[in-house]
Image (cartoon, grey):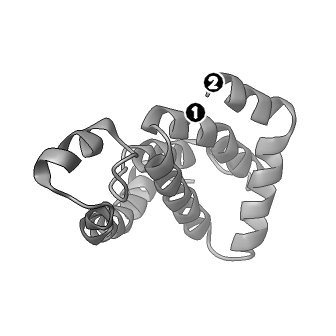
Amino acid sequence: MIPVSGALETTGGAELIADSIIKIAGSAAPWVTLTMVLVGTMFLSDLVNNAAAAVLMAPIAISIALSMNASADPFLMSVAIGASCAFLTPIGHQSNTLVMGPGGYKFSDYWRMGLPLEVIIALVAVPLILLIWPF
């Protein structure tokens, strides 16, 4: 995924995605954009490896920060936290896959427990990120 991330940055894809996220956020407060980066990274982390999610989202987060004339630190921290939250699927993290068979879990079991956990993490992480790494 590192070459894909490099290509995303070199071709301007990261900037295009960042501009799209900023347009969706509109004139909302900057913490809304930070939350969108966190939730987007969480969603991506549920589909691919957490390291791949971080590598893919980091250039996008930096582009968003540059577009907003803000520090990249809070956006990169939201990427790091979001990439570590693969709770919605058994394919997001190898530990989820390992316990699925022996635990008798179904695919839908991950959503029932993972979604509330990801909501709690987002509610706690965004204010703490802004407290420690201000824009």
Task: Look at the numbered discs 1 and 2 and tell me whether their residues touch, using CB distance below 8 Å.
Answer: yes
Camera-nearest residue between 130 and 7:
7
Amino acid type of disc 2?
Answer: Ile
Which corner quadrant of the image does residue 28 belong to?
bottom right
- In this orientation, which residue lies closer to the viewer: 83 or 69? 83
Q: How many marks?
A: 2
Circle nearer the N terminus (1, 2) = 2
Q: Which mark is residue 2?
A: 2
Q: Nearer the viewer, residue 119 or 31?
A: 119
Crowd band around label 1 with a 10 angstrom C-alpha radius: few (<14), some (14–19), many (20+): many
Point 54% across, 42% down: residue? 76
Q: CA distance from mark 1 to mark 2?
A: 6 Å
Q: Is residue 117 left or right of residue 14?
A: left
Q: Residues within 10 Å of mark 2 (few under 14, many from 20)?
A: few
Please tell me whether residue 109 is drawn above or below residue 63 in the rendered image. Answer: below
Q: Position of residue 57 (x, y in %)?
A: 61, 43
- Residue at position x 70%, y 30% from top? 4
- What label sits on residue 55 in the rendered view? 1
Task: Name the image quarter holding the C terminus.
Answer: bottom right
Kind of residue at badge 1:
Val
Percent from the top left, x then y, of residue 60? Answer: 68, 45
Residue 123 x, y percent position in the rendering: 36, 69
- Write down the quadrant of residue 68 in the picture: bottom right
